[in-house]
Image: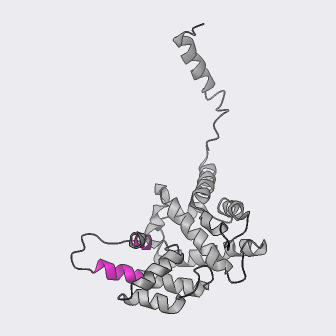
Amino acid sequence: MEIPIRETVRECRSTLSPRRGWPAVNYPLTVKDRFRQIAIETARMSYPGSMSRGRKPVVRAGTKKRIEEFFSSDQFALSDLTLPRWSPAAYGDWHGITTGALADRLATASYVAGPDNNPSAVAAKFLDTFMHQLMKYSEFRPVLPHLHLALDRRVLGRLKALRYSPPAREISGRVGGQSPYSISYDDYRFVQGRLWELVAELNERRGMEFQISSRIELNLLWL
């Protein structure tokens, strides 16, 4: 039996009416709820799965859920990242505090695997991949120029190959041969500082038609 088109349209409108609600759609209504959903979605999308796989995983099972809980909690004030007050120093301080808080969560529940892996280095990696993924939402882009580059073995290996670059040589001299997940937070900050020098070096090349404005753009070096 054929259902009249007019009747079908009327029923659809009734189903989607604000009075009856959206029973099948779990979409946020408030800014607070939206930020929480953004945090959850970003944590899931940015999680580097390779860190919990293989013969020597960096973190144990359950870490992904713990990371998601951290970024969607009141301890991580996502709304602060929309403010236009950010500077390199302010972002660096915030990064240190946030990394420490996440590292404490990971260490307390023994989520970091292996005796050589440093919870701070592991937490920094999760924070940096989260922040990189977060940039698809325009309201958080005030911090884009200050983002840190997420470190992994490929990055450190490529920097070692750039032996004609003074900043890259300094990085290799300080953390060469170490796992990016075992370095101290002081070494991590040293690397991030030298990466800015590498950015400046690349920007000064003859014939450069654009300027690199964020360390995360260095990812083009590893292609």
Drawn side of residue 199 relative to residue 27, left or right: left
Drawn side of residue 172 relative to residue 111, left or right: left
Q: Nearer the viewer, residue 102 or 75?
A: 102
Quadrant where the image shows the N terminus: top right
Does the magenta run of residues contain 124?
A: no
Q: Quadrant of residue 102?
A: bottom right
Q: Which residue is drawn at 74% across and 71% down?
A: 111
Residue farthest to the right, as pictured: 109
Residue farthest to the front, as pictured: 55
Residue 58 x %, y %: 66, 73
Residue 19 x %, y %: 65, 27
Q: Quadrant of residue 59?
A: bottom right
Q: Give the range drawn in magenta.
A: 196-218
Q: Which of 45 and 104 is in front in this view?
A: 45
Q: Residue at x 55, y 88 (%)?
A: 177
Does the magenta run of residues contain 214?
A: yes
Q: Residue at x 58, y 53 (%)?
A: 38
- The relative height of residue 86 versus residue 1 in the rendered view (above or below) is below
Quadrant where the image shows the C terminus: bottom left
Q: Which residue is drawn at 39% across and 84% down?
A: 162
Q: Which of 99 and 121 is in front in this view?
A: 121
Q: Which of 89 and 219 is in front in this view?
A: 219
